[in-house]
Image (spheres, coloured by chain):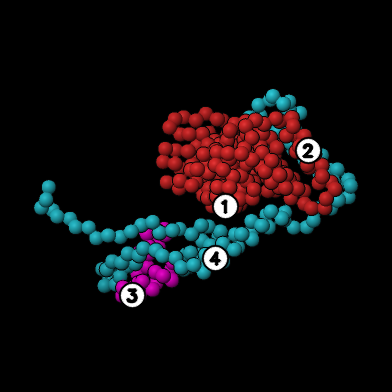
Chain colours: A red, B cyan
């Protein structure tokens, strides 16, 4: 049974200053790792495929991945069907890459869909690292994909002026966007995700 | 490019990765070299994992141990929290010492493998069974 604090964090309207410093998503670990393995099982042939699932909360408060789906190397469309008594919490997906740019954090469309779908928890797995967005009382109600796409492009253009790793710039973008749109942002391994924003 | 009223249900999309590829190529064309080594955020996570390992190695962990006499006049000690964690020894005290040794090895191996250490959730209690009552 999850703690009351954990349930509050996943309520979708937790005040930002009451977010937990750490999240433990170990109950999803096996499924996350399995879906990652499937995402890169044909990497030797130069082929990867994003996988996704829907995160539901069962009546005992436990989180579970359901509706596993496979997409392409470029995108994946989760299946949002949730049968009662399970409750929709959010989505999980993977970011496999063939060019070695790993682990790849959230893209701007991940933020857009997390807002539009009112995900309370959006989890991403890429090369053994887990990233998570937690909806809070401050999370934007509406997402404008046009504006957010422009913000994303403008931020990443700056990478060409900096000598830091490209992936670090993408991670900086994640922190900036999480703060701007009112998400809690976590990163780490399944049983130890640390709050970054 | 998405318009302002569009519902975005998919995760990622061709436009996302095409732009990242374009940036990579522009960066290479400008002669900007990628620094060596893993990204800073990956280094940060690795450091946290190492710190947790070090902390857990120093902690004292408590587990329930069960002892039972066996046919060969010795004792068997079992730790139910760890899978197949059973030792046998001629005396109860020796079985206890052997079990602690086994637990140390098993827990250290789990830490080295980056696994989470199990926590004891079980408890032992003697219960009385009166067969004469309904």
Mark 4 or mark 3: whose residue is earlier in sequence: 4
User: Which structural element holds mark 4?
Assistant: helix
Q: Nearer the viewer, residue A12 or B34?
A: A12
Nearest to viewer (mark 2 / mark 1)? 1
Q: Which mark is residue B93?
A: 3
Asked if residue B86 is among those painted magenta in the image, a careful observer would answer: yes
Subunit of label 2: A
Q: Are marks 2 and 1 in contact (CB under 8 Å)?
A: no
Q: Are marks 2 and 3 in contact (CB under 8 Å)?
A: no
Kindly report the distance in space between the C-alpha atoms of the residues bearing marks 2 and 3: 68 Å
Q: Which mark is residue A21?
A: 1
The residues colored magenta run B78-103
Kindly report the distance in space between the C-alpha atoms of the residues bearing marks 1 and 4: 18 Å
The picture places residue A59, in percent across and down from the top left corner, at 42, 37
The picture places residue B25, in percent across and down from the top left corner, at 84, 43
Q: Do discs 1 and 3 belong to a common subunit?
A: no
The picture places residue B41, in percent across and down from the top left corner, at 69, 53
User: Which structural element holds mark 2?
Assistant: helix
């Amino acid at each position: 049974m999850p703690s009351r604090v954990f349930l509050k964090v996943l309520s979708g309207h937790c005040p930002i200053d009451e977010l937990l410093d750490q999240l433990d998503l170990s109950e999803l670990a096996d499924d996350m790792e399995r879906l990652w393995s499937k995402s890169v099982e044909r990497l030797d042939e130069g082929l990867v495929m994003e996988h996704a699932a829907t995160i539901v909360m069962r009546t005992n408060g436990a989180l579970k991945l359901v509706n596993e789906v496979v997409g392409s190397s470029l995108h994946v469309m989760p299946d949002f069907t949730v049968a009662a008594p399970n409750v929709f919490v959010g989505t999980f997906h993977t970011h496999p890459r063939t060019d070695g740019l790993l682990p790849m954090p959230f893209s701007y469309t991940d933020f857009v869909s997390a807002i539009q779908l009112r995900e309370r928890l959006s989890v991403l797995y890429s090369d053994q690292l887990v990233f998570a967005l937690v909806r809070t009382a401050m999370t934007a109600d509406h997402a404008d994909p046009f504006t957010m796409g422009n913000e994303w492009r403008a931020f990443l253009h700056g990478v060409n002026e900096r000598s830091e790793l490209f992936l670090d710039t993408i991670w900086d973008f994640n922190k900036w966007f999480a703060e701007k749109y009112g998400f809690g942002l976590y990163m780490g391994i399944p049983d130890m995700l640390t709050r970054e924003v | 490019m998405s318009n302002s009223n569009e519902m975005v249900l998919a995760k990622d999309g061709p436009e996302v990765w095409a732009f990242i590829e374009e940036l990579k190529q522009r960066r290479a064309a400008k002669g900007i070299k990628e620094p060596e080594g893993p990204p800073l955020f990956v280094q940060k996570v690795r450091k946290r994992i190492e710190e947790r390992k070090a902390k857990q190695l120093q902690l004292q962990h408590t587990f329930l141990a069960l002892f039972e006499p066996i046919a060969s006049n010795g004792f068997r000690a079992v730790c139910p929290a760890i899978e197949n964690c059973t030792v046998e020894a001629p005396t109860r005290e020796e079985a206890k010492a052997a079990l602690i040794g086994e637990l140390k090895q098993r827990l250290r191996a789990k830490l080295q493998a980056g696994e989470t250490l199990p926590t004891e959730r079980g408890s032992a209690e003697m219960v009385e069974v009166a067969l004469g009552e309904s």
